[in-house]
Amino acid sequence: SAKKKWRQPVASSVLELGGNKIAKDDVVRDDPTNNVPDTIFSKLGMQLHRRNNHPLGILKNGIYEYFDTNYPNMFDKFDDLCPIVSVKQNFDDVLVPADHVSRSYNDTYYVDSQTVLRCHTSAHQAELLRRGHTHFLVTGDVYRRDSIDSTHYPVFHQMEGVRVFTPDNWEASGLDPTSYAAEDLKKSLEGLARHLFGAVEMRWIDAYFPFTNPSYELEIYFKEKWMEVLGCGVMEQEILKSNGRLNSVAWAFGLGLERLAMVLFDIPDIRLFWSTDERFTSQFSQGQMGVKFKPFSKYPPCYKDISFWINESFTENNLCEVIRGIAGDLVEEVSLIDNFPNKKGMTSHCYRITYRSMERSLTDEEINDLQWNVREQVQSKLNVVLR
Ligand code: FA5
Ligand code: MG
């Protein structure tokens, strides 16, 4: 069938993850509660952050170096925790409310109704606290159904940091425990940013996360725009208390490694992190922090528009997933270029799809085939009426 034909090739049907063997059939299933496509399954176990010559591995090691220098022997490091976690670990343990959008099938990949591909490394906070860790860094691949553009990809990498304080830490400061932790957090992360970037323009934004209060995001000025690189805050007391830490206060952060690496190495497109093209991979080597990426000549983009009348259940994430399922990394961007209602109360959307390969020129025939398949599947899977 057309569906089979356009599925992406899968590396292997059995994966080794954190010491466990996981069969593809256990992750990608014909089950109504499963929404993990082959394109996503094939990324499980790649662990780009554990490759010392990959920009993400180089960055991870650079961040380790900052913590090891400033806090010798203090932080325990984890970079091989299994990305398949329970709904409880990913959401309940970090107090994500039952009706929060991030729990929806539109935003998260579900293996079954109780199991997800972690959407953040915060999924490991509670278990590590419970196991007695009070200072830790967790690096891993995370998965989200999301829109498509140069800074968003459905698989990316985060590093979580947690530090727990006890009364002797804050008592001497004259500050209340929460202010003490918040100040220490901002100082530590500003120090990290200086360690990585030297002089760089940054700003703190007030934010909201269910698991921290107060919460902040750090933005860095990059390519004439403010780019969000991390979320952080003072951990909710409930998380500490339910996991064996009474009379404590803690900070936590979650860094987007790709976003930081884009700034550090001047990498213009998030898809490049997955490239196996030697013109990309050969530019990075262990310990070489911040070597600027020299772009190789870009192949021309090809634009195709698709218009349809949407229905009530239409979402842009579903559209992007259909397109990515067909075109994989050949799709660079999907953007809404026209949106209007008709007199009967229906709404028309027109999306412009940018196709481009990082590695070769695409033929007209190939793109027309892709677009034909996109049209067919957008109609059949999303139940919209093409115009
Ligand atoms: C979180 O995931 C929180 N768990 C972070 C956190 C941890 C807050 C601990 C407080 C305490 P957020 O969804 O904003 O937050 O993602 C964190 C970072 O991941 C973002 O700042 C961004 O750098 C990166 N990120 C988010 N979505 C994507 C994506 N689709 N592609 C690449 N990077 C992304
Ligand atoms: Mg955010």
Image (cartoon, grey):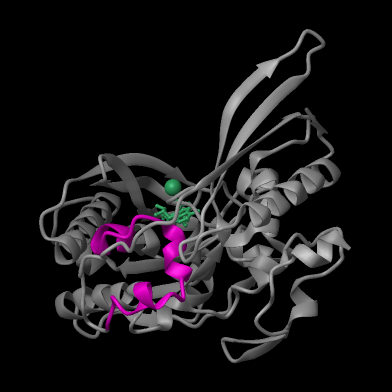
Q: Nearer the viewer, residue 172 or 194?
A: 194
Q: Percent position (x, y) of residue 205?
A: 31, 40
Q: Nearer the viewer, residue 160 or 52?
A: 52
Q: Percent position (x, y) of residue 123?
A: 54, 66
Q: Percent position (x, y) of residue 32?
A: 86, 58
Q: Quadrant of the N terminus?
A: bottom right
Q: Nearer the viewer, residue 285 or 180?
A: 285
Q: Residue at x 36, y 45 (%)?
A: 214
Q: Nearer the viewer, residue 292 or 218?
A: 292
Q: Is residue 386 left or right of residue 231?
A: right
Q: Which residues are magenta?
A: 260-285
Is residue 201 part of the magenta span, yes or no?
no
- Residue 255 visible? The answer is no
Q: Quadrant of the C terminus?
A: top right
Residue farthest along the left direction in this orientation:
199
Residue 334 occupies which quadrant of the picture? top right
